[in-house]
Image (spheres, rainbow, N blue to C red):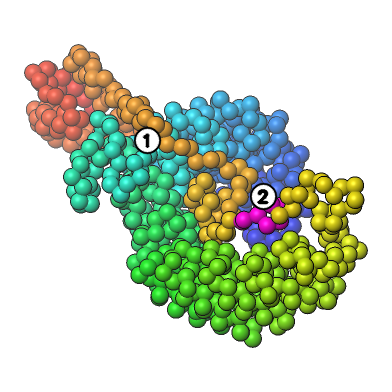
Amino acid sequence: MKRIIGMIAKGRDASELFPAVVKNVVSKNIEVKKLVYVYLVRYAEQQQDLALLSISTFQRALKDPNQLIRASALRVLSSIRVVMIVPIVMLAIKDSAADMSPYVRKTAAHAIPKLYCLDPDQKEELITVIEKLLADKSTLVVGSTVMAFEEVCPERIDLIHKIYRKLCNLLVDIDEWGQVIIVNMLTRYGRTQFVNPNKNDTDECPKIQNSNLDSSDLSSCEEAGIDDKSTVLDQDHRLLLRNAKPLFQSRNASVVMSVAQLYHHLAPKSEVNVIAKALIRLLRSHREVQSVVLNSIASISIARKSMFEPFLKSFFVRSNDPTHIKLLKLDIMTNLANETSISTILREVQTYISSTDKQFVAAAIQAIGRCASNIKEVTETCLSGLVSMLSSRDEAVVAESVVVIKKLLQNQPEAHCDIIRHMARLMDSIAVPQARASILWLLGEYSQLVSTIAPDVLRKVAKTYINEEDIVKLQIMNLAVKLFLTNPAQTTLLCQYVLKQAKYDQNYDIRDRSRFLNNILFPPEQFKDSVLSKHANNIFLAEKPAPLLQSNFVDREEYQMGSLSHYINSRAIGYQDLPQFPDLPTDSSVRCVALPEEQEKPAKQKTERSSNNKKKTFYSDSENNSEDDSSEESDDTDDDTTDSSSDSSYEKIEPETNKNQGRFVDSDVNSSSDSESVESDSSD
C-alpha cells in the first residue's frame, strides 16, 4: 500500500489496482486501513461501482473507536459521487457532526460541500447541520464549518449573528487555514452590517451615530489628534478590527494578506496605515508571494499614496527580479511619485533604460511619461530626456520614446513645435512600425504647425508605401487626407496617388478605408453635394482630447482585494461582488447571545446539583476508574476507622464541592450533606 500511495504521489495512474485494494478495506491493521482510505478518496469517483460494494464497511467504520478511522471513512463515503447513496452520506454527516472527537466533526464540515455539490436539494438539511457546527466550541471545527457555510449558504447572514463575537474572540486561536476563511467571511459580513467608516471622505475618524461605542475608539481618535468624540465606530465593528490586528504578525502570508484586505475594505483611513508595514515585511520575507503582494500594494497606492511613501526604496528593481515583478514595482513607483520624490524616482528609472529586458525598458520609458504627465514641474525635463533617447542605437528605446512623446505633446503641441520637427527628421532612420506610425499621426494632427515639413514627409512615405507595415499604411492615408484638407495645392495629387495604391492592397481593412476616404474627398459627379463631403473638415480635423497616462490598477477597486478577479483584473468564475456599505447601521442586538435564565426556586437548583453530583461520572471512563479505586480504598480504610471519622471526612469534602460548583450555601446544606453521607455509608 505504501508503494501504491507513492506511485499516486508521483503522478502515476494506479486505478487498475482498485479491485485488489478495495478488498483490504476490511483489514484489521489500522495503518493498512488508513492507506486504503487514502487510495479510495483518490479513485472512488472513477470506480463508483466497485466503491459501492464497500459502503457497508464504511458504515461500520463510522462506529470505530479510532477517531482517524471514523474520519477517514466519512471522507471516503462523501467522495463517492453517486446520487443513490445521498441518504446514507446525509445520515453519516449528521452522526459525525455530533461526534465526541473534534477531528471527526471537522471532517463532517468538509463533507458538507461535497454532498451539496452532489445533490443541491439537501440544502435545508445541510444548513441545519452547519448551524449546529457553527456553535461548536472547538477551534479545530470552526474554520471548516465557515468554509462549508461559504460554499452552501453564504446568503444566510442570520446564522453568523449569534456567533459573530465568538468568531472575533477565537480568531487568534484558530489554525491558519481557518483564519483566512473566517477573515474573508467577516469582511463580507462587516460590509453588510456596518456603515462606511470613511463616509465623509476625510482623514478623521468617521462620524457614526450609534449608541454602541467603544473606549478604544476614543483613544485612537485622541492619538490621531482628533477632539471630536462622536467620531467612533460601532462596538462590534471595533471588536473585529481589534481582534484581527494581531494576525498581522502571522508567519503565514495568506493570513497577513487576508487581514490586510479586511482593513482595506472596513477600517477608517486613520487606521489603515498599519497595512503598509505588514505588507512590506511580507514582501521582504516571502519572495514566493511577491506578485500578489505587489498587486495589492499597487491597487492601494492609487488612493492612499502617503501610506507607502516611507518605503519607496523597497520598490526599487533588483537585477534578479523576474519581468512581471519589475513591471509591478515600476507601476508602484510611478503611483508614489510626488514633488519631493520625483527626482529620486527619475534617477532610478533612468538606470533601467540600459537593461537587456526589452519589455522592462519599454515599461520604464512609459513610467517616465506618466511622471511627466502627472507632475507638471518635471514635464519639460522628462520631455528633453525622452528626446535625447531618440538618438539611441537601440530601436526599441527609440520606438517607445516616440510613442510616449506623442502622448505628451498632445497636451501643449504649440509649445513643442521643435520636437515635432525633430521627430519628422527621424523618419528615415526609424524602422519600428509603431514609432513610424506615431510620427505620421503627429504630423497629420498638427500639420498646420509644421506646414513646410509635412508635405515632404508625405512625398517620401508615398514612395515606400508598398513596403510599409499595415499600421504605417493606415497612418500614411491619414496624413494624406489631413494634408489634402489643409494644403490642397501641394498635396492633392499625392493624396490621390496614396488612395489609389491602397485601393488594391492585400489587407481588406486598408482597401475598405481607401474606398471610403476616396468617396468622401473625391466623390463622383452625382454625389458632389453630399453631406459627408461638406463636413469633411469637421470629421477629419476634429479636436481630440489628450490621452490620460494612468496606472493599470485604476479600475480594480471594484474587485475584492486579494481575490483572483482582482489579480487578473477580470471577473473570475464564482466571484461574488463585495457588498456595499448600508446607509444606516443594523441593530447590534441581533449579535447578542441570550444567556440561559436563572431558575427562581433554590430547591430546583439543589435537586439539579445533587443529580449532577450523582451523574458526574458519566463523561469519561477515567473518572469511573478513579472512583472505583477510591471506593475500594475507602473499603479498606473503613475497617480500621470509626463512623465518626467517615462522617467528619464527608463534612470536610462537602463545602469544597459546593464551593467548586459555585452554588450558594444556606441552612439546608447540612441536611443535604447528612443525607449524602448516609447514602455513601449504605453504598460502602
Is-magenta flag for residue 539?
A: yes
What residue lies at 61% left-to-right and 56% top-to-bottom? 544
Q: Which residues are magenta?
A: 538-544
374 horizontally vs 417: left or right: left
- What SS does tag 1 mark? loop
In depth, the one of 205 and 95 nearer the eye is 205
Quadrant in the rendering for residue 448: bottom right
What residue lies at 20% left-to-right and 13% top-to-bottom? 601
Q: Quadrant of the C terminus?
A: top left
Q: Amino acid at mark 1?
A: Phe
- What SS does tag 2 mark? helix
The tag on residue 42 is: 2
Q: Is residue 490 above or below residue 430?
A: above
Q: Quadrant of the N terminus?
A: bottom right
520 horizontally vs 110: left or right: right
Q: Residue furthest front?
A: 489
The tag on residue 194 is: 1
For the question of whether residue 51 can be seen, the reply is yes
